[in-house]
């Protein structure tokens, strides 16, 4: 695991005359976007961005195109406008590196994280260069994913069950609204017993950055696959869903429906961890992430922790 702060780029308020981060983001927008193409993420320090309203002001100043977390697979709570808690997974769990909503037909270009309460220990929003991950993977793995892509399977309950509900995922109680969203966004859907919903999304695993035209590793195959859990949990899941793993709350195969070899998934995790950068949050920090160039995750933590996130196109 890397620990030196080469990513994200560190931008301190003392390095500029502008003390308002929204003003800086608006005034230096072109420069910052150019830096993000090269650096992937910028950590703004000493600007005191420590609540949802301040975070929203930064997003609006930079792009003005904030997004709802519709079709998201991570548990989180909408707090204000289009600002959410960063994740609500248990603190002892490591959240693997991923590009937000890479399983969707559309995804945010930028992620904004701010620190309201830093953890007593751990809790870094870890980052990694998606280009470096792609480069460090074996040729066999790269070509397999480039040629086949990924099929993401999710089984959402109708209000009672394991994992997320379709109501929370799509922020609606309307089945018709969900169906319309799926049709517009190339999502295969099937209503199951007890008002449950199965979603299948076939996506590319490697895409081209719209500005740099570089190829990047852009998928969540290893995160959706049950082998991302501890060996004990993985074995239990495979036993429970023996013969029908695609009925798990979430699952992943190659785009042609064939299973992804476990050694490839382990290679992805190993390469991602090799390229992972961690840093300690301080209250008021804001990190701006190019979601295509940079994968992110979360390290386990102790004590209270509150990180907010907002997304924009």
Image (cartoon, rainbow, N blue to C red):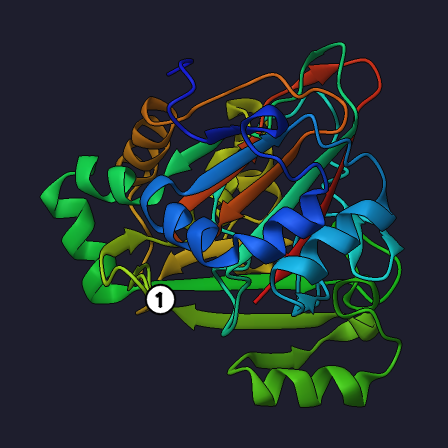
Is residue 245 in view? no
Looking at this view, is 78 or 13 the one in front?
A: 13
Front residue (pair 144, 204): 204
The residue at the far front in this view is: 17
Q: Is residue 194 above or below residue 298?
A: below
Q: How far across and down, in percent of the image, does residue 35 sit?
A: 39, 46
Q: Which one is in front, 241 or 126?
A: 126
The quarter of the image holding the N terminus is: top left
Residue at (81%, 46%) from the top-left corner?
54
- Which residue is the site of mark 1? 257
Residue 42 pos. (x, y %): 50, 37
User: In the image, 4: left or right of 280?
Assistant: left
User: In the image, what residue occupies the spot 54% across and 55% down?
Assistant: 110
Compared to 187, does 27 lie above or below?
A: above
Callout 1 crowding tier (Cα within 10 Å): few <14, some 14–19, many ≥20: some
As helix, strand or loop, the secondary structure at mark 1 comes to: loop
- Asked whether, in this view, residue 256 is left or right of residue 191, the answer is left
Residue at image location 45% in from the left, 58% down from the top? 30
Hey, which residue is sitting farthest top in the picture?
A: 121
Front-most of 1 and 240? 1
For the C terminus, the quadrant is bottom right
Q: Locate residue 165, reporting x and y percent.
A: 79, 61
Q: Is residue 127 left or right of residue 287?
A: left
Question: x%, y% of residue 69?
Answer: 71, 62
To which quarter of the image does residue 301 belong? Answer: top right
């Amino acid at each position: 695991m890397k620990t030196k702060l080469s990513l994200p780029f560190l931008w301190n308020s003392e390095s500029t005359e502008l003390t308002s981060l929204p003003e800086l983001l608006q005034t230096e927008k072109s420069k910052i976007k150019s830096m993000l193409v090269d650096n992937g993420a910028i950590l703004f320090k000493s600007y005191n961005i420590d609540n949802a309203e301040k975070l929203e002001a930064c997003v609006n100043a930079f792009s003005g195109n904030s997004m709802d977390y519709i079709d998201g697979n991570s548990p989180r709570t909408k707090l204000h406008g289009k600002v959410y808690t960063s994740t609500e997974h248990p603190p002892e769990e490591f959240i693997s590196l991923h590009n937000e909503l890479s399983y969707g037909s559309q995804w945010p270009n930028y992620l904004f994280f701010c620190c309201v309460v830093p953890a007593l220990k751990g809790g870094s929003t870890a980052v990694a260069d998606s280009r470096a991950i792609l480069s460090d993977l074996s040729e066999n793995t790269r070509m397999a994913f480039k040629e086949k892509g990924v099929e993401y399977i999710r089984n959402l309950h109708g209000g009672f069950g394991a994992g997320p509900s379709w109501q929370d995922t799509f922020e609606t109680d309307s089945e018709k609204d969900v169906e319309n969203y799926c049709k517009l966004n190339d999502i295969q859907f099937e209503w199951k017993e007890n008002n449950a919903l199965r979603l299948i999304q076939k996506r590319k695993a490697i895409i081209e950055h719209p500005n740099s035209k570089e190829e990047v590793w852009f998928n969540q195959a290893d995160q959706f696959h049950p082998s991302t859990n501890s060996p004990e949990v993985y074995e239990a899941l495979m036993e429970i869903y023996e013969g029908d793993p695609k009925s798990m709350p979430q699952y992943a195969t190659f785009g042609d429906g064939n299973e992804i070899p476990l050694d490839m998934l382990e290679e992805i995790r190993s390469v991602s961890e090799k390229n992972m950068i961690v840093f300690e949050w301080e209250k008021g920090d804001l990190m701006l992430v190019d979601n295509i160039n940079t994968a992110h995750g979360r390290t386990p933590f102790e004590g209270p922790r509150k990180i907010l996130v907002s997304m924009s196109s």
